[in-house]
Every structure is written in C-alpha cells, then in structure tokens.
Image (spheres, rainbow, N blue to C red):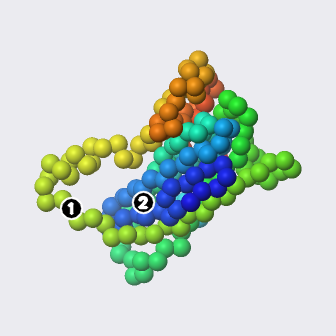
Amino acid sequence: MSSTLLRVYPSELKIPYEVKKQRSCCMQLTNRTDQFVAFKVKTTNPRKYSVRHSCGILLPRGSCNVTVTMQAPMEMLSDQHCKDKFLVQSVAVKDRATMKDFGPQLFTKAPGRVIEDFKLHVVYIAANPPSPVPEEEEEEDSSPRSEVVCEVKSFSAFDAACIGASAAEPSCAEGTSEMLGVVGERENMQ
C-alpha cells in the first residue's frame, strides 16, 4: 500500500510470537516524489515496541528500512488477535533539510502543510521452529536483518548521489547538521 508521498511495504506488520524471545520485523519506506519527505513512525503501544529510525528525511526517490522490535512476551497469548497499530506520518520538506531543522510541530496540521497518514496493523504469526542444522541458523543470525539499509551522503557527495543514484539502490542518510537523513531512534518526535 502507499500514499502520495511514501510507499509503505508491507501493509501490515507480521511479527513472530514466541515466549521469552524478542522479535523484529521490517517495513520499507520509499519516497515516491522528487521532493525530500520527512517521516515519523508512531505506535499505540510504545512500551511493547521499539522502532529503529522512528523519524527521518528520505531523499527524493530514496528508500529506507525501519525495524520494529517487539519486547519479549512472558506468556503465551490466549488470543492471537492483536490490537496494536503503527502510524507512519509523512510530509514534504524543503531541499537539504534535516530533522534538526524541525520540532514536533512538523507533523502538526497547519495551513499549507499536508500530512499524510498510513496505518499498519500488527499481526502475530507463529515463530519458526529452530533450524536442524546449526550452521544455517548461525548464518541467518549473522545477517544484518535488524539494521537499516542506508547510505550516508554528505552535502559534498549529495549532488553526485542524486544524479547517479539508480532506482533500485536504497538511500537515506544518517542525520547530523552536515548530512541529510534519518535521525536517531526515539528522538523527541514520538
């Protein structure tokens, strides 16, 4: 599913449920425009979930993976139905902006500012049984599945990156005052 500014994939968050195990899933945000787009990810249950890269700015046509981690449940569910939801908000921002240029008011409705909302439901799925071959399991565990796939681009490399970036190449940038991009998780934007 998608909005005008962002494509959000998948349209629901499927999280493996296993007692005493912390589990994660990813969603990919893709900027569908030729503008810079700021995003913020919120949840109805912030004590249960942590979000890596809960807010940031995507380059034009860029993508970024956001990791949602559910805290380890202490008991089995009596009902597999989950009422938890996530909200991805997005808004177009000026070129070369950083999240430090904005405060919480960025995602507050104001005249001339269009804020798009995309809701995702959480769905619990059965956790995969352990692999019978330990080497394969170790290989899977060493993969960077919980890390955001991003490229850091400074202003000096920015113009070349925009001109030479391919559509298939994911791109977002870590945020400092000299760089564009995704700001650290749980910044005062939650």
Q: Nearer the viewer, residue 143 or 186?
A: 143
Quadrant location of residue 92? top right
Q: What residue sits 42% from the left and 60% below the top?
A: 71
Residue 122 at x, y = what percent? Answer: 49, 67
How many numbered discs sit on the rendered protein? Answer: 2
- Does residue 21 lie above or below 29 as drawn? below
Q: Residue at x 86, y 50 (%)?
A: 111
User: Which of the labelled discs sits on residue 130, or is there none?
Assistant: 1
**What x and y, as percent, mark residue 24?**
40, 56
Looking at the rendering, which quadrant does residue 183 occupy? top right
**Residue 1 visible in this rendered orientation of the protein:** yes
Foreground: 3 or 23? 3
Question: Which residue has dot 2 on it?
Answer: 71
Name the image quarter holding the N terminus: bottom right
Report the side of 118 relative to 168 (left or right).
Answer: right
Residue 39, disc: none
Figure check: 188 above or below 165: below
**Distance (Cα) linking label 2 and label 1:** 20 Å
Q: Within 10 Å of the Cα at label 1, are there few (<14), some (14-19), or many (20+) other Cα atoms? A: few
Secondary structure under the numbered disc 1 in the rendered image: loop
Give 144 or 72, whichever is nearer the viewer.
Answer: 144
Please say if the residues under marks 2 and 1 sit with CB atoms less than 8 Å apart: no
The residue under the point 46% across, 50% down is 67
User: Judging from the image, what secondary structure is the residue with disc 2 in?
Assistant: loop
Comes first in the chain, label 2 or label 1: 2
Q: Residue furthest bottom?
A: 78
Tell me if residue 154 can be seen.
no
Residue under the point 76% across and 47% down = 105
Amino acid type of the residue tagged 1 in the rendering: Pro
